[in-house]
Image (tube, helix red, strand yellow):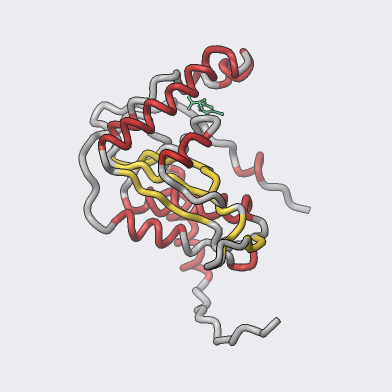
């Protein structure tokens, strides 16, 4: 294989105090992020989603294959169709496909098969994982670590949205397959996550949750 041209890394060391200050500020900012299920219909300012998706697209990926597509849906009729199809699946989920233990685990979130937010939120971002690539002749190109890669990109996206002042919900109407024909995706793309994005409604409530403390999630050896 040809070696790719190499360029000097653009990296500047920060002072210890600057590092600590930035890390603490970011941790505080991100711990304020909450998943939102009640959205205002207010539209988002032009260009903000583009910048957030650009940040998501800067995620590292297996062999730098960037195996992702971000579909942004703002068209009301398409949102309505997505809601109808999602609710059809969720009625089956809540009606017996999820067992009692699962339904119990969801109680704090007061979820049910009704997914009004899929129509209220001004935009839906649907992440597609490219299970393989396609060349100009339609031949398959092997992709590597696509699950890891798309998960990292989703994390980048959620973080970018929150820092830009946009609320989101990591929504997985399950199974997600219905999104592939509805959004006319090519055969190599698998729906991975549906994110309604926008401003929370004025009276939005969220469950009073606690995050695990650092000593519960960090282990030193
Ligand atoms: N997909 C269903 C159920 C659901 C499952 C989990 I795990 C959640 O954290 C939340 C919901 C729904 O969207 O209602």
Please give left or right for residue 57 compared with residue 132 in the image: left
Q: Hey, which quadrant is residue 114 in on the image?
A: top left
Return the x and y of residue 177 as percentages of the image width and height. 53, 36
181 vs 214, nearest the viewer: 181
Looking at the rendering, in which quadrant would you find the N terminus?
bottom right
Which residue is depicted at the point 57% across and 50% down? 151
Return the x and y of residue 2 as percentages of the image width and height. 67, 84
Which residue is depicted at the point 50% across and 81% down? 10
Q: Is residue 62 visible?
A: yes
Q: Is residue 20 above or below residue 118?
A: below
Please give left or right for residue 203 compared with residue 3 in the image: left
172 vs 204, nearest the viewer: 172
Which residue is depicted at the point 55% across and 31% down? 175
Return the x and y of residue 131 as percentages of the image width and height. 61, 52
Q: Hey, which quadrant is residue 115 in on the image?
A: top left
Q: Is residue 1 above or below residue 140?
A: below
115 vs 39, nearest the viewer: 115
Please give left or right for residue 117 compared with residue 135 in the image: left
Q: Hey, which quadrant is residue 196 in on the image?
A: top left
Q: Is residue 110 visible?
A: no
């Amino acid at each position: 294989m040809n070696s790719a041209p190499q360029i000097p890394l653009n990296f500047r060391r920060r002072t210890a105090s600057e590092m600590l200050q930035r890390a603490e500020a970011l941790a505080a900012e991100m711990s304020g992020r909450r998943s939102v299920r009640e959205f205002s219909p207010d539209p988002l300012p032009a260009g903000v989603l583009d910048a957030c998706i650009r940040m998501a697209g800067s995620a590292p990926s297996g062999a730098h294959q960037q195996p992702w597509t971000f579909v942004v849906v703002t068209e009301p009729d398409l949102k309505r169709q997505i809601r109808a199809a999602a609710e059809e699946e969720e009625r089956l989920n809540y009606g017996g496909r999820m067992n009692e233990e699962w339904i119990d685990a969801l109680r704090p979130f007061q979820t049910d098969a009704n997914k009004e937010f899929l129509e209220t939120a001004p935009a839906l971002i649907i992440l597609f994982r490219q299970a393989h690539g396609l060349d100009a002749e339609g031949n398959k190109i092997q992709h590597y670590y696509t699950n890891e890669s798309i998960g990292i990109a989703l994390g980048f996206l959620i973080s970018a949205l929150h820092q830009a002042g946009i609320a989101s919900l990591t929504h997985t109407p399950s199974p997600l397959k219905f999104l592939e024909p509805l959004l006319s995706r090519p055969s190599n793309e698998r729906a991975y996550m549906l994110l309604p994005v926008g401003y929370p409604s004025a009276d939005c409530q969220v469950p009073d949750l606690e995050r695990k403390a650092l000593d519960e999630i960090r282990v030193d050896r």
